[in-house]
Structure formats: C-alpha cells, structure tokens
Image (spheres, grey):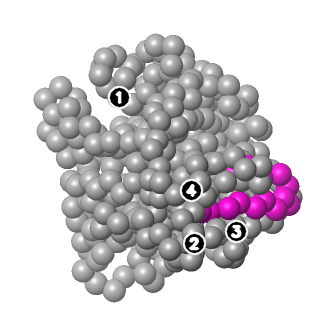
C-alpha cells in the first residue's frame, strides 16, 4: 500500500517506563495528533511498526456521535523498551474476520443480554426483560462470566445453539452470578450495606472490534439509603486482556458523597488476597459443575480505595467516587483449563503487573515528519 497522499507521516514513540514486560498494550491516538496527515477520515489512517509491518488499527467513537475521535492499535513491550511506529494516510481499511479479537452485542433473543468477549474471556450482563422472564426470571445488575478455552470469538455460536451449560470443546457457562456482584458488578455503599440497581434498561454500542469492544448501559434510578441515584455504566474490553474496564457515572437528587462498592461473588473454598498499595483484590476458587478452578480479580485506583469489605454475597472493594461522580474499576477472571494461568500465584502475578501497567501507562509522543 502506498504511504500517504503527499501529507507525510507521523512518528509515534512509545515507551514502557516500568521494568516488566507488557503485552497487548493499547496505544490511543487522538484525531488531533494525526491532523498533520491531512486526512480527517480516521478509517484511512494506517500504522506500521519498526520492521515496516502494518499493524491492525481501529477507530473509536468515544461520545456516541458516530464520528470517531480516536485511533487505537496494540503492541508488545519488553521491560523498559522504547518502540517507534509510523502513521500515514491511505485507502480506507478493510478488515478480515480473522483479525477480530474483541466483539460484543445486544442479545434480544435471550431476554436482552449484552454479551462481550475477546480472545481470552467472555462475559454478559442482564437486560430488563429478564426480570419478568417466564422460564428463568432474575433481577440483578450482576456480571456473569463464560469460560472459554479458545481464542476464537464464540458469542454468536453459543447463543445460536443455546446449549452452552456444558463444555462443548470451546468452554461453557459454569458460573451462577445470581444476586451477587459476579465478576465486577457494582453498587453504592451506605449505612454499612451495598445498594444495587436492577437490570439495565438501555444499551448503546460505541465501538466493536477488532481490538476493543466498548458500550454503555443505562439503569433506572435506584434507592441508596433514602436518596435516588441513576447510573450510566461504560464497559470496555481490549484484545489480549483478562480484565474489563467498568466506568460508572452517577446522578443524584442531592449533593452527596458517594462510595462505590465493586464486587466479586463469594465462593466456598476461595482463597483471597488484597494488595492496597496497587489497589487489587485477587482470589482463586473452585468452579461449579466440577469444571475446574478459576481466578477472579478487581483493580481500583489506589488513591480512591477506602477499604476491602465483605457482605453476605461478595468480596468488595469500596471506592470513593470523585466530585465529578464518575468512578472506574477493572475486573476479570481466568479458567485453569484455558491454559492461560496454571495456579493462584500465576494469576496474582498477572493481576499485579496489570495494576502496575495502569499506574504507569505507556508514554506516547508524536512528531510530524
């Protein structure tokens, strides 16, 4: 592919500033960073690495106006490594199915689930029709998990056959999230208890692969110790990662200091460890249906962490909600039969390195050439 259209190139310098390897790190470029290329259509911007190999890029619409504001791509970094890339304008990118490593969709045929996945994990969250479902009613803003042992995307296949409660060779649904917070569901903590919303009532996709799936869910106002609070939850998952980013924005009927409680379902026989310095909670537990063992994890911003807490159903990380009423946490899991992590020590190492990567992001600098 010819490079550019007479507008030159942009050099991208990316630095891993910590002494650990970081894989599948997502580099985010703003449209303004690429303006010197003279191409406003980000779907026509391409990126090559140091060897001259083109890397997969994706545009991201961050505000839902159908016009992308970001261009993203991924790269692996050795400890302390500096890498350089080159962005240039060309023909509109055309993807192949095999390039997609992240995907999600609203599932009307299954009581309005929203399911999302990447090449490592799959999850789902429940829509309002499930509250009154004749066969299996459930009122819960929990996060359910699907354990898979393939890098292929399985959402459509599993829903199509509607037979995923046993291991079909690619994995299965071995988890009952129920009324717990499941894997990273959240609520608000007040009067020494967790107050939670019902199922989501609206969904809005923002971007859908091949690198990142990102969408928003809207919840009806719910009571928190005598006040009404509404929530919009933004959820994103990047290829190559075992943790989803959850970002909740709250609105209240008064000026109230909020505390978010992000949780993981309690399981008999679990082993739990908390690291307040880096803001993570990790655990290892037996799975239902004798399906093996799994790791679960939560990561929060350490400076916003109030404390680790528990209620009858959940291990919780309590997080101070900033004055803008938007708070983030990361949550995820692994399955020992996927071959990704062999035991709790292996899982904890991954979680801590992920937390360190969040604390010290890849440093990106741009220069026109």
Residue 81 colored magenta? Answer: yes
Q: Which residue is mark 4?
A: 46
Q: Which mark is residue 83?
A: none
**Outermost residue, bottom side:** 255
The C terminus sits in image quarter: bottom right
Q: What is the CA distance from the residue labelled 2 to the residue labelled 1? A: 41 Å
10 Å neighbourhood of mark 1: few (<14), some, or many (≥20)? Answer: some
Frontmost of labels 4 and 1 is: 4
Which residue range is magenta in the image?
75-88
Indicate which disc, 3 or 4, sits on the residue closer to the N terminus. Answer: 3
Q: Position of residue 325 (x, y in %)?
A: 41, 77
Horizontally, residue 177 falls left or right of residue 314, namely left
Horizontally, residue 299 falls left or right of residue 173, namely right
Q: What is the CA distance from the residue labelled 3 to the residue labelled 4? A: 12 Å
Q: Which residue is mark 1?
A: 156
Examine the image and state in which quarter residue 206 appears.
bottom left
Q: Which residue is mark 2?
A: 7
Say if residue 180 shows up in the picture. Answer: no
Q: What is the CA distance from the residue labelled 2 to the residue labelled 3? A: 13 Å
Frontmost of labels 1 and 3 is: 3
Mark 1, secondary structure of its residue = helix
Frontmost of labels 2 and 1 is: 2
Indicate which disc, 2 or 1, sits on the residue closer to the N terminus. Answer: 2
Closer to the camera in the image, 178 or 171: 171
Closer to the camera in the image, 150 or 129: 150
Indicate which disc, 1 or 3, sits on the residue closer to the N terminus. Answer: 3
């Amino acid at each position: 592919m010819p490079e550019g259209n007479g507008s030159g190139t942009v050099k991208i310098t990316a630095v891993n500033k910590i002494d650990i390897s970081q894989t599948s790190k997502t580099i985010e470029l703003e449209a303004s960073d690429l303006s010197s290329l003279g191409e406003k259509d980000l779907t026509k911007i391409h990126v090559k690495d140091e060897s001259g190999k083109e890397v997969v890029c994706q545009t991201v619409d961050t505000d839902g106006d159908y016009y992308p504001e970001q261009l993203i791509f991924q790269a692996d970094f050795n400890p302390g490594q500096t890498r350089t890339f080159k962005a240039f304008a060309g023909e509109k990118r055309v993807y192949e199915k095999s390039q997609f490593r992240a995907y999600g969709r609203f599932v009307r045929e299954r009581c309005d689930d929203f399911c999302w996945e990447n090449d490592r994990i799959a999850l789902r969250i429940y829509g309002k029709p499930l509250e009154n479902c004749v066969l299996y009613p459930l009122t819960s803003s929990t996060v359910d998990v699907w354990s898979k042992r393939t890098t292929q995307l399985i959402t459509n296949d599993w829903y199509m056959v509607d037979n995923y409660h046993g291991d079909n060779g690619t994995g299965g649904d071995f988890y009952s999230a129920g009324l717990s917070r499941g894997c990273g569901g959240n609520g608000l903590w007040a009067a020494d208890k967790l107050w939670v919303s019902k199922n989501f009532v609206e969904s809005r996709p923002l971007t859908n692969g091949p690198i990142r799936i990102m969408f928003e869910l809207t919840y009806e106002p719910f009571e928190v110790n005598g006040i009404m609070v509404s929530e919009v939850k933004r959820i994103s998952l990047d290829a190559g990662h075992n943790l989803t980013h959850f970002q909740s924005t709250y609105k209240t009927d008064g000026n109230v200091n909020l505390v978010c409680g992000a949780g993981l379902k309690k399981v008999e026989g679990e082993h739990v460890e908390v690291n307040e310095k880096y803001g993570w909670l990790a655990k290892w537990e037996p799975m239902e249906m004798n399906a093996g063992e799994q790791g679960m994890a939560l990561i929060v911003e350490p400076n916003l962490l109030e404390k680790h807490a528990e209620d009858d159903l959940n291990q919780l990380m309590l997080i101070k909600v900033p004055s803008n009423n938007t708070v983030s946490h990361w949550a995820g899991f692994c399955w020992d039969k996927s071959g990704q992590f062999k035991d709790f020590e292996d899982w904890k190492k991954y979680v801590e390195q992920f937390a360190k990567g969040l604390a010290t992001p890849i440093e990106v600098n741009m220069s026109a050439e």
